[in-house]
Amino acid sequence: MRLKDLSSQMWGAPRKFDPNVGERRVSWLELFFDLVYVIAISRITHHLSLHLNVHGLMEFFIMFMMIFWGWVNGSLYHDLHGNEGLRTRLMTLWQMIIIAGFSITLDNTEDASYRNLTITLMIMQLYITYLWWSVGLYDQSHRKYNLPYTILFLISFSAMFLSLFVSQDWLRFLIPIVLICNYTPPFIAKLILQRDRLELSLSSSMFERFGLFTIIIFGELVLGVVNGMSEARPLDGIGLVNFIFALSIVFALWWIFFTLTSRAEPKSGFNAATFIELLFIPALISLGVIAACFNNLLAVAGPNPTVNKIFIFAIATLLISIGLLLLVMYYPEQFEETRIKVRKSMWWAGGFFVLFALITPTMNVTLFLGVLLTFILILIFVLNSMYYTLLQRQKSDKNEDDG
C-alpha cells in the first residue's frame, strides 16, 4: 500500500481545477519549455524573411497561430493543473519534442514540407486534445469543462487530416475551420463556468508568461538585425549607422511595450483573460514581421518600397494592439486618467503610421530607419511627458494638502 501511494505521489496526477488558486512563481520547467518555442518562432520568422510577400505573410500568420495555440494550451495546462510530479515533466517533454519536430520540417522541399508540417501539427493537435481530456480521468468534475475542447480539437484534427488528400483550393476553407475550432473552446467553457457560478481570471504567473514570450519575439528582432548586417556588403560607415538605427528602433519598441504593460495587472474575469490572449496575437505577429523586415532591409543596400510599407504597417499594428491591451488592464487609481490618454495616443500613433505607410516616398535604408526612429522617439517623449506631468501634479497636490 505504501509503495502504491509513493508511486502515485511520484507520478503526480493533474492538480484539481480551482479558479481561486493562489499566486505562484513561474517554474524553471516552464522557462525551459519556452526555449523550444524560441527555435520554432525563429524558424518561421526566417522563412518569412525569404518570402516577404502576401503569400509569405499568410503562411507566417497560419504557422504562428498554430505555434501560439500550442504554447498557450501547454502553458495554461501547467498553470491550472501542473505540479512537481513526473507526469507533468513528461507531458512538457512530449510537447517540446513535437515543436522541435515542427521546426525541422520547415527545411523540407515544398511538397514534402506541407505534408510533414501537417502531420507534425496533427500530432500536436492530438497531444493537446489528450492533455485536456486526460484531466477528466483524474477529476470527474472537470469533464464538463474539457468536453468542448475535446470535441472541437478533434474536428480540427479531422480537417487537418482531410487536407492531406484534397487539392490546395480546399485549404482556404479547411485552414479557417482548424483555427476557429482551436480558438473557440474557451468561449464555450466560459458558459459552463457561468452556469456553475465560477469565474476564471488570468493569473499573474500566466500574465508573466505572456511577457516572457514577448521577450522571445523581441529577441527575434535583434536576430533579424544581426542576420541582415551579416549579409550586408560592404560593411562600411553607412552600415554602422543602419545597425545603430535598427537596434535603437528595437529598443524603443521594447521600451514602449513593457513600460506600458509591465506595471499593469490584467483585469479580473474570463473576458479580460481571453482578450489579453487574443490581443497578444497581432502584437507578436507584428514583431515577427518587423524581424523579417530587418533582415531584408539591412542585407540590401538599395531602397525597397514594398518592405518599407510592410515594416510600417507592422509598427502600426503593434502600437494599436498595445492601445487595445490597455483596455483590459488596470493601473493604480491615480494613473487612470493618464492611462486613457496613453491608450488614445497609441491609437493615434498607429493611425499615423498607417497613413505614413500609404504615402511614404521611396527612401534609402538609412533615411528610412532614421525617420522611423525619429517618429518613435517623438511618441516616447509624448508618453513620458504625460507620465511626469501626472507625477508633478500629484506632488503639487500633496504639498498643498500638507500646507
Image (cartoon, rainbow, N blue to C red):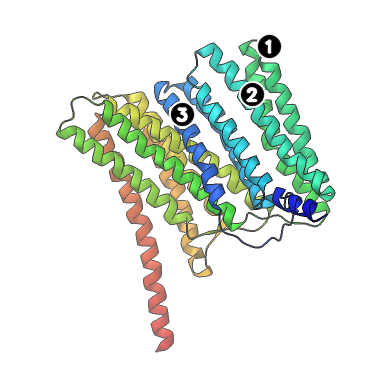
According to the image, label 1 marks what residue? 165
Q: Quadrant of the C terminus?
A: bottom left
Residue 92: image location, x then y, percent: 61, 41
The residue located at (44%, 46%) in the rendering is 215
Residue ID for mark 2: 175
Amino acid type at mark 3: Arg
Q: Are marks 2 and 3 in contact (CB under 8 Å)?
A: no
The CA span between labels 1 and 3 is: 26 Å
Residue at 47%, 34% in the rendered image: 39
Which is nearer the N-term, disc 2 or disc 1? 1
Residue named by callout 3: 43
Between discs 2 and 3, the one toward the N terminus: 3
| Front one among 216 and 385 | 216
Q: Amino acid at mark 2?
A: Ile
Nearest the viewer among 245 and 46 is 46
Give the side of residue 38 with respect to residue 199, left or right: left
Residue 147, position in %: x, y? 80, 40
At label 1, counting other C-alpha atoms closer than 10 Å, the crowd grade (few under 14, some 14-19, many 20 or more) is: few
Q: Where residue 77 sits in the image (x, y, percent)?
A: 67, 46
Alpha carbons under labels 2 and 1: distance apart: 14 Å
